[in-house]
Structures are given as C-alpha cells and as structure tokens.
Amino acid sequence: MTYKFLNFEKVESTSDEVRNVILKDSSQDVVVIADMQTRGRGRRGRRWYSPPGNLYFSFSKTPAINPAALGQISLVTGIAVHHVISKLLPSSAQIALKWPNDILVNKMKLGGILIETEQFPGREYATCIIGIGINITSSPEMVAFPPCALRDYINGLPDKDELARNIIDEFNRCYNVWLYDGFEKLRSEWLSLSYGLGKPVSARAENGFEIYGRFLTLSSDGAVVICDDDGNEYLVRSSEITYL
Ligand code: BTN
C-alpha cells in the first residue's frame, strides 16, 4: 500500500494528526512526519521530548486479525526499525530491541515505538496508529535508559523523510510476513535481535505480582516468558521489564 505523506513543521503529536485524518475520512491512511512535537508522548503516558533534529512520524495499519494478536505489531515494527537503522551504524555500535519496543544502541535508547489501537467508525477492524521516534541529532533525557542519538555513531546524518520511507517499506515487508505466514518466523527473528535474553529481570506478571527471574524467551504470541529461580514460568504482556 502506498501512503500519502504529510509533512509538518510543528504538531502536538504525529500520532494525533494521523488520528485526526482518519476521523475526517476513514478511507484515508497517511504518514505524518513532523520536525518537532510539542506534546510528543511515549509509552505509559511518558513525555517524548521532541526538539527539532530528530525523526518523529506516525502511520496507521488496520490488520484483519484477531484483536488478541494486535500487540505483536509492536514487535513487527521493532524488527523493521532494527533492519533499517542497523544498516546505518558502524559494526562497533550494537543495536538491539528491548521488549516490547525500545531501540537500544550500546545499551542506550536511540528510539521508541508507540502503538495506539482504536476502533474507528466505518472500519471493521481496529486500527493501530504506529508512532516512531528516532534520535538523530539530540538525545533528550529519558526515564529508565540513558539516551543516545545517531549523531553519536555516524558522521553524515540521514535524510529524515528517506529514513521514514525506508522504515515504512521495511515495516510493510515484515507486516506481510506476519499477516500471511504468522508470527512464529518473526518471533525467532525478534529473539535474535533482542537485548537481554537470559538476563535477570523483574516485571509485573499477568496475575498482578511483581516477579523476579530470567528473561527466558518470547511466547508463541509475543509475551515475555520469565523463569524464576524455582523454575516457575510467568508471562508478561502489558507491563515493562526491568533489567536488574
Ligand atoms: C516510547 O519509547 O515510550 C515510545 C516513544 C514514541 C515516540 C513517537 S515520536 C512520533 C510519535 N508521536 C508521539 O507522540 N509519539 C510517537
């Protein structure tokens, strides 16, 4: 599918702009790119500081799938971003994905992915608005991880529009694998690109308890599997994992 690209100098959030376009005309799917955001947001209601110089863009997808599987789209997006960004980096820069959707380089956060799902009138399936932020020239402070930017690793900086287009092309390739071949192939790929397999972590499990153990693997549907010292396995779907 080809998207119409809308470029803005300044918006509150590129994800809100995508939402506004769909609300006006539900047949439209667009990519919104902005030079800066005044109310950029990250996961869990955090702010995503969005000064000029970095990449901020959002687009939408409406997969005709079981809503229970929608969370996997975040992992699909992470793989696509990893593929594109890793081509820009020198081999000394270790890029990895932190579940569910942080882009780390040398254990510092280069970017993040925000997936927001909404049922729009006139659409049969829920729409995912996928927002991606990549630090290019500056590294705004972040919670939990020290930040970094592409400028820390490369000399010539990429054209932001081209970078967004490359990520969307790669996303579409991964998305089609996901839709037509299923998540399993991408699951093993995500694991091969991930940060912290086997490391000690803590997280809030589905039963509401804080659990401590090792990051064992991803379940067949994309949840984190944590194994504690007694060999009990827990699934984590909606919280974050913390490396200890
Ligand atoms: C995170 O790591 O918490 C996710 C950050 C996602 C930031 C991007 S920037 C483009 C889009 N617009 C937003 O307001 N947020 C996302």
Image: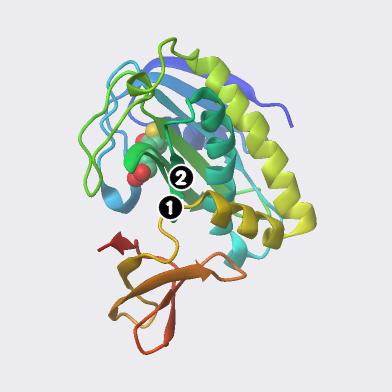
User: Which residue is disc 2 drawn over?
Assistant: 96
Residue 226, percent across and down?
Answer: 42, 74
Q: Quadrant of residue 110?
A: top left
Residue 188 in sight here: yes
Dot 1 lies on which element? loop
Residue 16 in sight here: no
Residue 68, percent across and down?
Answer: 59, 67
**Colouring chosen for the image of the structure:** rainbow
Q: Quadrant of residue 136?
A: top left
In the image, which disc is placed on residue 195?
Answer: 1
In the image, 239: left or right of 25? left
Q: Earlier in the sequence, mark 2 or mark 1?
A: 2
Closest to the observer, 94 or 74: 94
Amino acid carrying label 1: it is Tyr
Q: Are marks 2 and 1 in contact (CB under 8 Å)?
A: yes
Task: Count residues near mark 2 (Cα–Cα under 10 Å), then give few for <14, some for 14-19, many for 20+.
Answer: many
In the image, 35: left or right of 178? left
Amino acid carrying label 2: it is Ala
Dot 2 lies on which element? strand
